[in-house]
C-alpha cells in the first residue's frame, strides 16, 4: 500500500472514530431528537459575546459551504461584503459591541458537501470555531440525497465531537428549479431539517424564509443576483434567520 493510500486510510479511520465518539457523547448526554431551540442553544456563546475586556475572549464563527456563503453574486463577481457571513459579522457587532468576533469563510464556489467534508478538519477545525454554519444543498443535488446525507453527518458529528455548536442552513433558491419537475431542492431542504432535528443542532431555514417572502408578495427574481445566487436582499433574509440564534435572554 502506497503512502497516499495509507494516509487516506488513516483519515477515514479518524473520521469514523470521531463520528462514533460524537454519537456516544450525544447518547451519554441524553439528547433527544428535535432541532435545538433558539432560546438556549447558543446561550454559552452569547454569554461570552456579552463579556467586556479583560474577561472576554475571541469568538470564532466559521461559515462553510459553497458559492453562496463564499459571496458569489453574478459569477464571477464575489461581493463578500454583501453576503451573509459579512452581514452576520456586522449584525453581531451591532448587537455585541464589546465582543471580539471573527466570522471566517471557508466556503468554496462550485463545491458540494463531499468535498467540504474532506477538508473539514484541515480548513474548518483548524480555526477552533465556537460555531460552524454548513450550507451545501444547492450543489448537493448533483451528488444526490444519500451521498449528501453521509457528508453532512460526517461534518456534524466531527463538529460535535469537538464541542462546536452547529447551525445547518437549508438552501437558498435556484430559479431553474421552478421549471424542472425533477429538481430535488425541496427534498434536500427537508433532509437538512431532519438532520438538525436528529442531532439537536440549530436550523437556519433559508428555504422557508425565501418562500415566506414570495408568499408576502416579493418576486423571487428581486432577491437574486443570478439564477442560483442571492443578491443583497436575498442574503439579508438569510442573515435575519441566522441572527435569531443570537437573541440576548431577557
Image (spheres, rainbow, N blue to C red):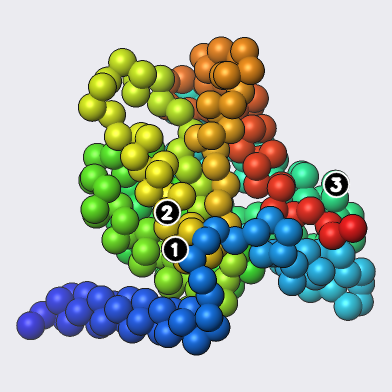
- Indicate which disc, 3 or 2, sits on the residue closer to the N terminus: 3
- Indicate which disc, 1 or 3, sits on the residue closer to the N terminus: 3
Image position, residue 143 (x, y; %): 23, 45
User: Is mark 2 in CB contact (under 8 Å) with mark 1?
Assistant: yes
Residue 142, above or below 3: above
Residue 53, above or below 147: below
The disc label shown at residue 226, or none: none
How dense is the environment of label 2, judged by Cα within 10 Å: few (below 14), some, or many (20 and up)?
some
**Rendered image quadrant of residue 215:** top right
| 84 or 182, nearer to the observer | 182
The residue at the point 24 percent across, 54 percent down is 147
The residue at the point 77 percent across, 44 percent down is 91
In the rendered structure, the answer to whether residue 101 lies left or right of residue 117 reads: right
The residue at the point 72 percent across, 64 percent down is 40
User: Closer to the camera: disc 3 or disc 2?
Assistant: 2
Which residue carries the number 3 mark? 94
**Rendered image quadrant of residue 137:** top left
| 155 or 124, nearer to the observer | 155
Can residue 154 be seen? yes
Could you give the CA–CA distance between mark 3 and mark 2, rounded to whole angstroms?
Answer: 32 Å
Could you give the CA–CA distance between mark 2 and mark 1, rounded to whole angstroms?
Answer: 6 Å
Can residue 71 be seen? no
Image position, residue 227 (x, y; %): 42, 20
Secondary structure under the numbered disc 2 in the rendered image: helix
Image position, residue 104 (x, y; %): 60, 56
The disc label shown at residue 194, or none: 2
| 232 or 246, nearer to the observer | 246
Which residue carries the number 1 mark? 198
| Image quarter hosting the C terminus | bottom right
Secondary structure under the numbered disc 3 in the rendered image: helix
Secondary structure under the numbered disc 1 in the rendered image: helix
How dense is the environment of label 3, judged by Cα within 10 Å: few (below 14), some, or many (20 and up)?
few
Amino acid at each position: 500500500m502506497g503512502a497516499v493510500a495509507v494516509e487516506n486510510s488513516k483519515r477515514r479511520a479518524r473520521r469514523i472514530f470521531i463520528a462514533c465518539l460524537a454519537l456516544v457523547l450525544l447518547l451519554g448526554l441524553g439528547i433527544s431528537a428535535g432541532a435545538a431551540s433558539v432560546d438556549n442553544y447558543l446561550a454559552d456563546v452569547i454569554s461570552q459575546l456579552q463579556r467586556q475586556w479583560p474577561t472576554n475572549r475571541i469568538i470564532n464563527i466559521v461559515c462553510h459551504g459553497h458559492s453562496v456563503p463564499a459571496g458569489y453574486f453574478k459569477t464571477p463577481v464575489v461581493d463578500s461584503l454583501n453576503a451573509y457571513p459579512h452581514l452576520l459579522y456586522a449584525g453581531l457587532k451591532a448587537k455585541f459591541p464589546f465582543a471580539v468576533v471573527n466570522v471566517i469563510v471557508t466556503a468554496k464556489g462550485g463545491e458540494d458537501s463531499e468535498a467540504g467534508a474532506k477538508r473539514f478538519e484541515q480548513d474548518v477545525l483548524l480555526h477552533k470555531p465556537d460555531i460552524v454554519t454548513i450550507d451545501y444543498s444547492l450543489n448537493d443535488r448533483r451528488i444526490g440525497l444519500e451521498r449528501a446525507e453521509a457528508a453532512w453527518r460526517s461534518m456534524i458529528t466531527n463538529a460535535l465531537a469537538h464541542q462546536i455548536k452547529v447551525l445547518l442552513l437549508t438552501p437558498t433558491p435556484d430559479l431553474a428549479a421552478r421549471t424542472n419537475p425533477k429538481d430535488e431542492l425541496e427534498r434536500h431542504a427537508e433532509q437538512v431539517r431532519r438532520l438538525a432535528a436528529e442531532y439537536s443542532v440549530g436550523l437556519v431555514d433559508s428555504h422557508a424564509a425565501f418562500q415566506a417572502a414570495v408568499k408576502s408578495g416579493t418576486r423571487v427574481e428581486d432577491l437574486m443576483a443570478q439564477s442560483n445566487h442571492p443578491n443583497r436582499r436575498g442574503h439579508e433574509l438569510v442573515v435575519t434567520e441566522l441572527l435569531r440564534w443570537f437573541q440576548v435572554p431577557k
